[in-house]
Image (cartoon, rainbow, N blue to C red):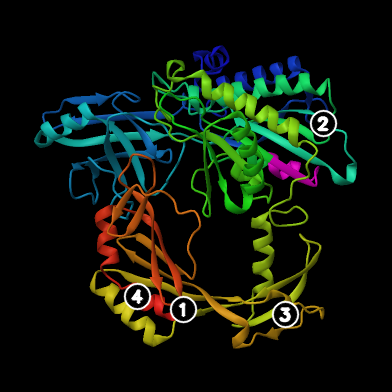
Amino acid sequence: MEDVAFWSSERFEGRLAGSEGNQLAAEEIAKRFRQIGLKGYQDDNYLIPFNYMYVDPDKMKKSLVINLKDGSQKELEYGKDWMEKSSGPNKDLTVPISFENPEGKILITEKQQPPNDQIRVQFVKTNKFRKYLTYSEQHSSFQISEPSYAYFIENEAEIENVHLVYYGSPVPTKINNVIGRMFGDQEQENKQAIVISAHFDHVGKAGDSLFPGSTDNASGVASLLNIAEQLKVISDEITFESDIIFAAFNAEESGLIGSQAFVEEIAARYDSVVNINLDSIGSVGGGKISLIGTENGSSELSEALVEIAESKGLEIAVNLEDFPSLMSDHFSFYTANFPSIMITQEEMPFLHMTEDTIDKIEPKPILSVIEWVTEFAEKNHQKQFTNIELENQGGYNAYMKEWEEQTEGLGFGEYKTYMSNLKDSLDIAYNLEKEWPQHVLEPLRNSLKENGFELTDSTFFYFPIDFDSLKVEDGEKIHQLKEEQIRLSNIQFDAVKSDVNFLVQVFNSELENMPEAVEYVDDWKLMSHQPGEEIFNSAIKTVETNHGIMTVFIQGTFTKEMFESFINSFEVNPLIEHFS
């Protein structure tokens, strides 16, 4: 597709947030918005700035030199032989290498190792480099090509040490989201915005290697512009009731920074906001078009989109999870309690690779999404969507902060009512957390200790059975819950070994949308930390008991072998017995 080819062309240099290519792309999108006939979001401005910490890749010092015992050197080429994986720009060290013992050395490994205090720097053999903008000041990992890995193996005895330099200074700057809109015909006191979004930034370059980002997310930008063009034509025939906002977000790859800045601003303008986010569509071998979201934050949008898809005979996949796992800009709307959903595809085979080029794009899914989302806006601009949780804005994080401030100082089972500034109504603060009794705690602690794990925290969480029975209107007077008013809802403990932390939770319920397993250990489902890697970030299993289905959920960053060691160090059934 011509539009996708334009946005992934070399002139934008991979669209790294903060770069000249990124700014050029922002200006081009603003130009297209104006040509289409959209209004600027602020005083007819399309470029909406926000604060960003930019590390200029051209000013960074990046080198990897192998010093041999005979005094000669071999320098590996950045972007071809090696590149970052998750490293903060703060490395300048000369140390020996090791394939097994990482302490005080650079670990050269075939498989990514979980971070711990011994492993400060590791180079992981990689057949295809993927570039991510994630940073870890304490535990740095780099990718190394297969030929370079083979060189280390073959010349281990001749290598004195390695001098690694990876250093740059973040500079505060301003970069831009690009926002255009069509005004709807609606009352000021009941304003709603339908936000259709796609991020335009990508990951830039690594040395001479360009990451074009054709599917991620030139295809989303092209789709966004086409949808805007079609809806502008429709708006000449009918008057939309909701405002339709077209958002090309920046710095998605850096942690959703652009969309977070925008959501904070838009919350003050509208009573209701819904978001459809387009990310990574049209990849060859990408599978079905997919709806990604959360059960409580995307269901209403999903139903409306599925209805249209079925009428068109469009085959799609729907994945609404209890726990969000695939992050994109729709998540910023979710955390502000606005309904949101992402349209993507089942697979992203060329994600963050130099191979994500225009020849990996197939037009059919993109054209289907353009038609699909256009029809959604046309059919649903009159519908008032319901915010997820709060009547007024403020966001889940702000709400939790206010709630935690109110619970401070309460003893177990105590509660009080307070006037919430976010909800503008009475809310209830309560403390229903307590430590495990010793007769339960000691056997678990001893069992974990025998296997090298330290128990660092353990809590029982209870829940009020009937919230309505707690509502009183006597200011902040403290009340005491009775035993029959609460039930055990969650058992939780933390265990640490070699600086790797496992968080274990047991729920008195079954997750409605169990994620697909990457791998199994007995009846445990293991979920991957990054696609295609053998590092896992969570494990789930369900247990059937006389009093219902229990879910055991473990979070951490671990290998399969480390997980097996951990689950063999304690028994699940004694924990579950406390729910009976």
Task: Look at label 2 and name its amino acid.
Answer: Phe
> Mark 2 — residue?
240
Residue 118 part of the magenta-drawn span: no
Residue 268 part of the magenta-drawn span: yes
Per the image, label 4 sits on a secondary structure element best described as helix
Per the image, label 2 sits on a secondary structure element best described as loop
Label 3 and label 2: CA atoms lie apart by 44 Å
- How crowded is the residue under tag 3: few (<14 C-alpha within 10 Å), some, or many (20+)? few
Magenta span: 262-274
> Mark 1 — residue?
579
- How crowded is the residue under tag 1: few (<14 C-alpha within 10 Å), some, or many (20+)? some
> What mark, if any, has residue 300 been given in the picture?
none
> Mark 3 — residue?
469
> What mark, if any, has residue 573 been given in the picture?
4
User: Residue at coordinates 62% horizontally, 24% vertically from top-left?
Assistant: 370
Label 4 and label 3: CA atoms lie apart by 33 Å
- How crowded is the residue under tag 2: few (<14 C-alpha within 10 Å), some, or many (20+)? many
